[in-house]
Amino acid sequence: MTQDIIAIAREAGIKSGDIYKLTVGHMSIETLERFEALVRADEREACALVCINIANKPSNVILGVAINCATAIRARGQA
């Protein structure tokens, strides 16, 4: 997970030297918001994949519920 967070931080535009800026309060709100959005999206997708894995069990009832669950989790990022 640490490597994932580092990759997400880089995608958000946070550079290695920016950690100091974060600790002293000099990092832009926009950069932090971008980082937060990416972390939240990553977690939503991880949760949705759990639902999809459940959907792969041999039951039509479980399949429908799990797919609806995954769709609802992913939709949280659209609100």
Image (cartoon, rainbow, N blue to C red):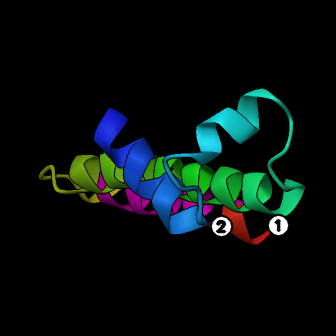
Give the x, y percent position of residue 40: 61, 50
What residue type is disc 2 on? Ala
State the residue at coordinates (74%, 72%). Answer: 78
The segment highlighted magenta reads: 62-76
Q: Which mark is residue 32?
A: none
What residue is shown with label 2? 75
Q: Secondary structure at mark 2?
A: helix
User: In the displayed structure, does residue 78 sit left or right of residue 51?
Assistant: right
Asked if residue 13 lies in the magenta stretch, the reply is no
State the residue at coordinates (44%, 43%). Answer: 5
Is 10 in front, or is 57? 10
Dot 1 alpha-carbon crowd within 10 angstroms: few under 14, some 14 to 19, many 20 or more: few
What residue is shown with label 1? 79
State the residue at coordinates (58%, 59%). Answer: 38
User: In the displayed structure, does residue 56 sit left or right of residue 61?
Assistant: left
Q: Secondary structure at mark 1?
A: loop
| CA gap, disc 2 and disc 1 | 7 Å
- Reply above or below: 71 against 32: below
Is 64 in front, or is 39? 39
Give the x, y percent position of residue 6: 41, 46
Give the x, y percent position of residue 52: 30, 57
Asked if residue 69 lies in the magenta stretch, the reply is yes
Q: Are marks 2 and 1 in contact (CB under 8 Å)?
A: yes
State the residue at coordinates (64%, 55%). Answer: 35
User: In the displayed structure, does residue 78 sit left or right of residue 43?
Assistant: right
